């Protein structure tokens, strides 16, 4: 059995100065195998992007890992010196961000940016890098790659820019690709194309995919497994089918119900808390949960039979 | 096409300035005849003087006569000395241009690195130190600074001559050092102001998504720096271009302090003596410098920003 492409165990991340640190990710444990597609789903502020940035070692000056460990291809990457981070980024893990309109440098041609990405690791030389760049553009479905590579980002549509960013991300054949809401800023038809492209790339190259989204419907359709995050913790995880067809955590159910469907009245999250939170140590979902009772004053751990786990006392 | 348009609009600005300049010159009280001929001159003498130089004609007629002679005989002759103004400018303009050029280079050499360092060490001690120094630099008046610099570096330490310019014939080093103090007197203010601008521009770019993208791809520090600088430069370039023009105004004052034979001497004597053609020529030349420096700044902007090229 090979080591997972990415393995996080009990990972915690905090922001702010030492004395007033605020933990935003609490003991997240997850694994992504090579070629597998794992989705992290949750609302804004649930810690999904921070988890991804921790893997990239891009938490910034204010953020740091305060507990747990991260392994990439079996190699411990929890704490790395700056030089090793450079080797990690792009070469082993690459990331695609949410807004393709601002993620490309407006002052350089897309070809040049792609070539810079290719030459950052195992530089094949200028000429080879340019022809590789054209191949990569063709691979991500851009017509006439020669002409496009000479163009600036503002001359490309949003969908095309996201394709260019995907090409840049896979340029150095990373083991893991992190996509942080890569389709949120795109319109629906382009969204489907980008998702299909990511699926093809994972299937053909064996790259593991960590797909961050708040759209459960979208990820249920194309990811293998799903982890639902709420307030910095994973509250439910399992295969996409299991979670989509038989959600166990009330928060997961809420997420599924939040998507409008024809023939069903729209249900939205309760805007006001249903109850006062009983304090530290209680289930984080307590104040919004319709099922909460005295048991929930103690936070439940992830539990369950097989691979479908849920952190709720009420789930079977 | 774009460039042709810019040339035309630049010429239009120059023409408009020449009209205003001409009018303002004529509005100064006291006729040049009175100054040249002295208090004892008779009314006939004054009339004759003014008639010879066309000063008794209407303002529009005088203006068109002045413009008409420009292509043929340049800026004409000084009322006072009778010397060719073109020759006069040929002697004094290079001194001022050289002073401004040295000032500008000093400014860039100071402002760009200081701004970069401040941005990269945002809110840590180098940033605070640079902020304090630039605040001091923009608060000190240039002419006062000039006097202090002369006192310290020329009088006390004797490193450089206190006034005047050492000719290039005596070696380029001596020539350059004689320009350092006057250039520094002007440059310090601009180093302070432009380093703040550079800092703000770099910090703004550092927060952009494409910098995060570049870092997440493991691009080297040098490459990331190039990505950042190319995007941070446009606002800096346009203000630097304008500063180059403003420096001519400062040069006039500082030249006086250091007794440099530049435009300042020519202009200030011309003003006190109501030497109309000389005033007009000098101010017009400075205006042209200002326009050219802005044009160059715009050209550089377009090289840096592809979105402007396609607009």
Image: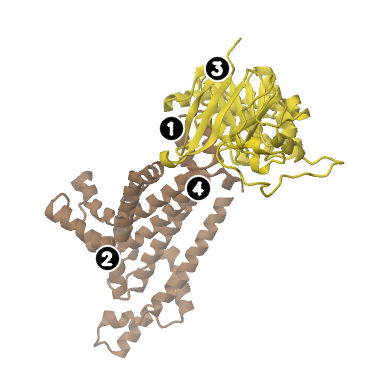
Chain colours: A yellow, B brown
Tell me if mark 3 has few (under 14), some (14-19) or many (20+) residues whose alpha carbon lies within 10 angstroms of its own.
some
Q: Secondary structure at mark 1?
A: helix
Q: Are marks 2 and 4 in contact (CB under 8 Å)?
A: no
First reached walking from the N terminus: tag 4 or tag 1:
1
Q: Chain of mark 3?
A: A
Q: Does residue B75 appear in this view?
A: no
Q: Which residue is mark 3?
A: A73
Q: Which residue is mark 2?
A: B265
Q: Position of residue A256 (x, y in %)?
A: 75, 36
Q: Which of the labelled discs sits on residue B222, or is there none?
A: 1
Going by the image, does B116 lie left or right of A71?
left
Q: Secondary structure at mark 2?
A: helix
Q: Which of the labelled discs sits on residue B301, or is there none?
A: 4
Front residue of B262/A110: it is A110
Q: Secondary structure at mark 3?
A: loop
Q: Chain of mark 2?
A: B
Going by the image, does B145 lie left or right of A24?
left
Residue at 36% x, 73% y is B276
Residue at 49% x, 36% y is A14
Q: CA distance from mark 2 to mark 1?
A: 47 Å
Residue at 57% x, 21% y is A7
For residue A98, which quarter of the picture?
Answer: top right
Mark nearest the camera among 2 and 3 is: 3
Mark nearest the camera among 4 and 3 is: 3
């Amino acid at each position: 059995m090979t080591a997972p492409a990415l393995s996080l165990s009990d990972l915690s991340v905090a922001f702010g100065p030492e004395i007033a640190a605020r933990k935003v990710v609490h003991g997240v444990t997850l694994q992504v195998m090579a070629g597998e597609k794992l989705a992290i789903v949750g609302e804004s502020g649930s810690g999904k992007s921070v988890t991804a940035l921790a893997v990239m070692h891009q938490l910034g000056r204010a953020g740091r890992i305060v507990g747990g460990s991260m392994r990439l291809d079996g190699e411990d990457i929890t704490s790395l010196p700056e030089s090793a981070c450079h080797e990690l980024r792009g070469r082993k893990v690459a990331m695609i961000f949410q807004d393709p309109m601002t993620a490309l440098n407006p002052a350089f041609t897309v070809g040049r940016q792609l070539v810079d990405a290719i030459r950052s690791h195992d530089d094949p030389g200028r000429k080879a890098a340019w022809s590789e760049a054209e191949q990569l553009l063709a691979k991500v479905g851009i017509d006439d790659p020669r002409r496009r590579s000479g163009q600036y980002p503002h001359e490309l549509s949003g969908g095309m820019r996201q394709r260019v960013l995907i090409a840049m991300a896979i340029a150095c054949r990373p083991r893991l690709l992190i996509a942080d809401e890569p389709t949120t800023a795109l319109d629906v038809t382009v969204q489907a194309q980008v998702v299909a492209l990511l699926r093809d790339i994972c299937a053909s190259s064996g790259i593991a995919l960590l797909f961050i989204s708040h759209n459960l419907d979208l990820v249920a359709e194309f990811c293998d497994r799903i982890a639902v995050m709420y307030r910095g913790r994973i509250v439910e995880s399992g295969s996409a089918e299991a979670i989509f067809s038989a959600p166990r955590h009330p928060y997961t159910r809420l997420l599924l119900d939040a998507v409008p469907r024809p023939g069903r009245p729209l249900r939205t999250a309760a805007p006001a808390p249903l109850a006062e939170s009983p304090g530290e140590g209680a289930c984080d979902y307590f104040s919004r949960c319709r099922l909460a009772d005295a048991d929930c004053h103690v936070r439940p751990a992830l539990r369950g039979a097989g691979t479908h786990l849920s952190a709720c006392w009420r789930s079977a | 096409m774009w460039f042709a348009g810019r040339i035309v609009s630049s010429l239009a600005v120059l023409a408009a300035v020449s009209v205003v300049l001409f009018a303002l010159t004529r509005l100064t009280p006291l006729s040049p005849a009175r100054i040249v001929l002295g208090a004892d001159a008779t009314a006939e003498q004054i009339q004759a003087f003014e008639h010879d130089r066309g000063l008794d004609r209407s303002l529009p007629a005088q203006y068109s006569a002045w413009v008409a002679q420009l292509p043929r005989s340049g800026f004409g002759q000084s009322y006072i000395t009778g010397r060719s103004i073109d020759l006069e400018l040929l002697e004094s303009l290079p001194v001022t241009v050289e002073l401004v050029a040295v000032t500008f280079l000093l400014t860039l050499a100071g402002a760009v690195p200081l701004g970069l360092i401040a941005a990269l060490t945002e809110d840590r001690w180098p940033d605070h130190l640079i902020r304090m120094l630039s605040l001091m630099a923009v608060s000190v008046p240039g002419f006062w600074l000039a006097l202090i610099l002369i006192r310290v570096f020329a009088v006390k330490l004797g490193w450089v001559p206190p006034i005047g310019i050492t000719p290039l014939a005596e070696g380029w080093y001596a020539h350059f050092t004689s320009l350092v103090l006057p250039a520094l007197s002007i440059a310090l203010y601009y180093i302070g102001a432009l380093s703040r601008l550079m800092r703000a521009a770099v910090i703004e770019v550092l927060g952009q998504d494409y910098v995060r993208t570049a870092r997440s791809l493991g691009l080297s520090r040098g490459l990331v720096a190039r990505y950042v600088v190319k995007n941070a430069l446009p606002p800096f370039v346009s203000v630097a271009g304008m500063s180059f023009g403003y420096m001519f105004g400062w040069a006039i004052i500082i030249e006086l302090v250091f007794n440099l034979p530049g435009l300042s001497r020519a202009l200030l004597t011309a003003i006190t003596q109501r030497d109309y053609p000389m005033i007009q020529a000098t101010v017009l030349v400075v205006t042209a410098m200002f326009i050219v420096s802005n044009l160059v700044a715009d050209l550089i902007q377009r090289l840096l920003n592809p979105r402007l090229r396609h607009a």
